[in-house]
Image (spheres, rainbow, N blue to C red):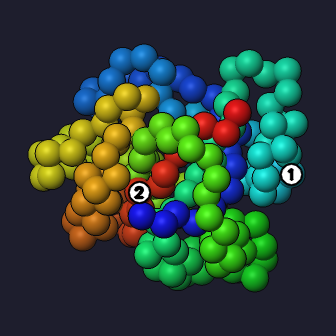
Amino acid sequence: MNHVLAGYRVASRGARQDWQDAGLPDGELVSASGCVTTVVTDGWDDWFGDPASAGRAREGRGDLHVLEVGIAARDVEPLLADVREGGWDVAAGSLPARLAGAEPVRATDVLGFELVGYDSGTWHTWTCLGGLVEDVRTATGVRPGRWGLVQDESEARAAADWLTASGLGDPKVFFWVAARLASAG
């Protein structure tokens, strides 16, 4: 499947917190969401446009990792519509501009797929909204694997589609996507 570059996130990895679903695996969790991990910002924005600037932001911090985030090309237009509806002007640059530019992802060390959605400037993950991991598992059979990510893209897409149709992310997230997370440093 074709994936469009959303950008790069500089984030920590951590263990499951008590408030997160018990269905998450033990050990390090990977997330592009500031809801469950520390995300380093690039001034006013959480997203870096290239791996070099993201790498500079993590210099001297062994607890941080650079993630390349990609969105399936077929999800870009609905995601951009959701972002616009949420108040982020697509013409403002950064993430919306990169998605609209349809630059392909580059990193090949794919870690897995994270179910994410946009809410007024914040990116939520299915693991930060209580009970969604168990709801998804019950409804679709999809469960998080290594690093708390879904390892199979078709399963991740089915889970994101189910979450969107179910409305269970409301009032935080209305449209869910399976974000492709790859190690970029």
Instruction: Mark 1: give few (<14), some (14-19) or many (20+) Cα within 10 Å.
Output: few
Q: Earlier in the sequence, mark 2 or mark 1?
A: 1
Q: Is residue 118 left or right of residue 140?
A: right
> Dot 2 lies on which element?
strand
- In the image, which disc is placed on residue 179? none
Residue 180: percent from left, percent from top: 49, 51
Instruction: Mark 2: give few (<14), some (14-19) or many (20+) Cα within 10 Å.
Output: many
Q: Marks 2/1: CA distance?
A: 26 Å
Q: Is residue 39 visible?
A: no
Quadrant containing the C terminus is: top right
Which amino acid type corresponds to the residue marked 1 in the rendered image?
Gly
Residue 124: percent from left, percent from top: 49, 52
Quadrant hosting residue 91: bottom right
Nearer-the-camera pick, 11 or 169: 11
Residue 151: percent from left, percent from top: 34, 40
Which residue carries the number 2 mark? 178
Which amino acid type corresponds to the residue marked 2 in the rendered image?
Ala
Nearer-the-camera pick, 154 or 123: 154
- In the image, which disc is placed on residue 43? 1
